[in-house]
Amino acid sequence: MDTLEKLRSKTESAKDLKSVVSAMKAMAASNIVQYETAVNALRDYYHTVALGIIAYFKAEKIEAISEIKQAKKNDEATICAIVFGSDQGLVARFNDSMADFVTASLKALPGKKEIWCIGERVQLLLSDNGLSTAKLYPVPNNITSITPLIAEILGRSQDSQVKEDIQEFYIFHSQPKDGAGYAPIMQRFLPLDEKWKASLEEIKWPTKLLPEIAGEAKPTLEALINEYLFTSLFKACIESMASENASRLDAMQRAEKNISDMLDDLNKKYHLLRQSSIDEELFDVVSGFEALKKNSPK
């Protein structure tokens, strides 16, 4: 049974926990602003690079991209999934939802599967789902540490494609929703073939004027392609980090509400028990007084 001392101790512990949760909530909110600002800036840059590639196609009158090498059959081809997760705590089901999404998505794709994970926790969840990881990368802890990670993944992906070990690459990451929340998405990354060209041309040229290429065509295309590949991975990573903090903020808000409800309940119990204790003391005083009054001589 709870005593006044136990209730007082529980209340103080709950207040301390609420302070920690409030600090984590403030940190997550601050990080979200930082990462969402980077996401918005990068989204504009990504759009500009995509328009540059479209401009090249129009200026050079490229109608189709020819396949240089014969692709393997679907059941023989290897598909690589680049999965962005989180190694930070207090993110609710952030990694679980990503692992479930990757598992379901890869089952729908034919061929062998190879997985490159960014984050050990999502790797363990994928392993529980029966998917083994070929490469494991640490999760960046700030914006400046993203660039070396992306450069390494980009180099390995291009090497694997040239050697024909892997024919298709897909990026799996979480993307912030408008307003609040996030959702896992899948994006085809490589190869840059006719499918890629068709998806890119969904972006319409903004004016009626035909674009022109400034400088030599080949170096211009190489620069645009390199920027496109780098920006695609960078954008996926930064959106994943923004989604991670959105998940943490949501978890901290729920935890803060639960702690507030618990504090209200503890305070009610404390006041009821204290009132009951006061009533018992008053009853003892009154009873003693009545007993003394009966035993006293007239």
Image (cartoon, rainbow, N blue to C red):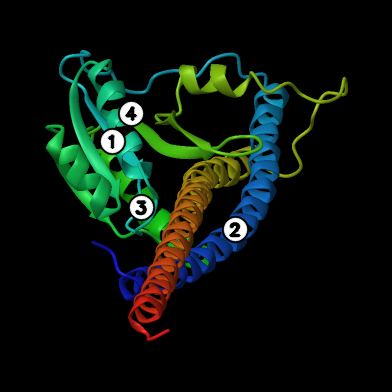
Measure the alpha-carbon separation of dots 3 and 2: 17 Å
Residue at image mark 4: 101
Describe the element under mark 4 as helix, strand or loop: helix
Seen in the picture, residue 282 relative to 251 is either above or below; the reply is below
Which of the two discs, 2 and 1, sits closer to the camera? 2
Whether residue 30 sits left or right of residue 287 in the image: it is: right
Amino acid found under the numbered disc labelled 2: Ala
Residue at image mark 2: 29
Name the N-terminal-most of marks 3 and 2: 2
Describe the element under mark 1 as helix, strand or loop: helix
Which of the two discs, 4 and 2, sits closer to the camera? 2
Identify the mark at residue 86; answer none if there is no mark.
3
Q: Position of residue 45 (x, y in %)?
A: 68, 45
**Residue at 23%, 32% in the rendered image:** 164
> Callout 1: few (<14), some (14-19), or many (20+) C-alpha neighbours within 10 Å?
many
Q: Quick check: marks 1 and 4 in contact, CB under 8 Å? A: yes
Q: Position of residue 61 (x, y in %)?
A: 67, 19
Seen in the picture, residue 171 relative to 252 is either above or below; the reply is above
Q: Position of residue 203 (x, y in %)?
A: 68, 23
Q: Position of residue 31 (x, y in %)?
A: 57, 61
Seen in the picture, residue 218 relative to 276 is either above or below; the reply is above
